[in-house]
Image: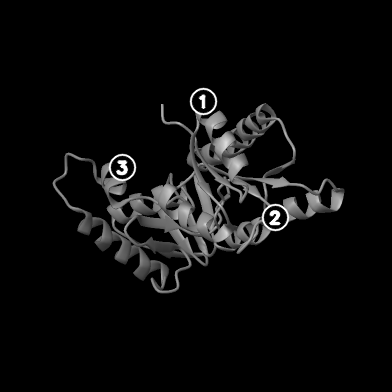
Amino acid sequence: MDRTKILLVDDEQDLTESLTKFLERTGFECRTAENGVKAAQCVTIFQPDIIICDVMMPVMDGREFLRSLRQEHNLIPVIMLTCVNTSYEKVMTLEEGADDYISKPFEPLELVARIHAVMRRSQVYACSLRDAWVLSAHDLTINRQRHEIYINGNPAHVTQRAFNLLEYFITHPDEVIARERLLEIVWGWENIVDTRTVDIRIAELRRVLQDDPNCPTYIQTVPHHGYRFLPAVKVIS
């Protein structure tokens, strides 16, 4: 089984070193960043399952980093570390999109318990998308059972491969998905095609969705990594 990937963001080197060792002994895979700017770069490259982020940091603090994630519709679970043990600070942390918070100083075992709890909640959300028949995102609605697509309530038509590709995107929002992974899932390795085939179907979806690749609403190209489905997804039924 793949290990849960944690991005630990904090400018206290002694803390990150000791906590990384503890978390890796507990079974996680860890990367570290010392501020929000470095963390944003690491999110794209490392693709963590969860982020543990300090509030007070130089260059870009934790709350600014969190806001930038949520403004990009990035739903990676985030647990904030705060030294300010006040109700206001905690409420603001949650209002800005954190999934949980923990006050410094803390016991590493308490952090592990919080990680497991947040991951359970996020996995329930992911499973609900994969189990739903009708999903919506921005102006798009997709009926997986009937293989129907609607944009602003109007039916739209795509090829079967493009539909399967869109179905995978909408059930895995905000994940950076490599072209090779899409080939494996949508086409299957028994089909002799290359990654250019994925790009052709992406272009088809963008035409139908009227999605500008330079300023995308739905499908973002992540250079050297693949594609990401941007908007938040809602379960209709």
Label 3's element? helix
Q: Nearer the viewer, mark 3 or mark 2?
A: 2
When asked about the image quadrant of residue 113, the answer is: top right
Q: Amino acid type of disc 3? A: Ile
Label 1's element? helix
Which numbered circle lies on residue 7? none
Residue position for label 2: 56
Q: In this rendering, would 116 be left or right of 198?
A: right
For label 3, count other residues whose C-alpha is less than 10 Å away and answer few (under 14), some (14-19) or many (20+): few
Q: Amino acid type of disc 1? A: Arg
Q: Is residue 230 above or below residue 178?
A: below
Q: In this rendering, would 74 be left or right of 57?
A: left
Q: Is residue 166 above or below residue 59?
A: above
Q: Are marks 3 and 1 in contact (CB under 8 Å)?
A: no
Q: CA distance from mark 3 to mark 2?
A: 41 Å
Q: Earlier in the sequence, mark 3 or mark 1?
A: 1
Q: Nearer the viewer, residue 47 or 105?
A: 105
Residue position for label 3: 185
Q: Earlier in the sequence, mark 3 or mark 2?
A: 2
Q: Are marks 2 and 1 in contact (CB under 8 Å)?
A: no
The residue lying at 35 percent from left, 70 percent from top is 207
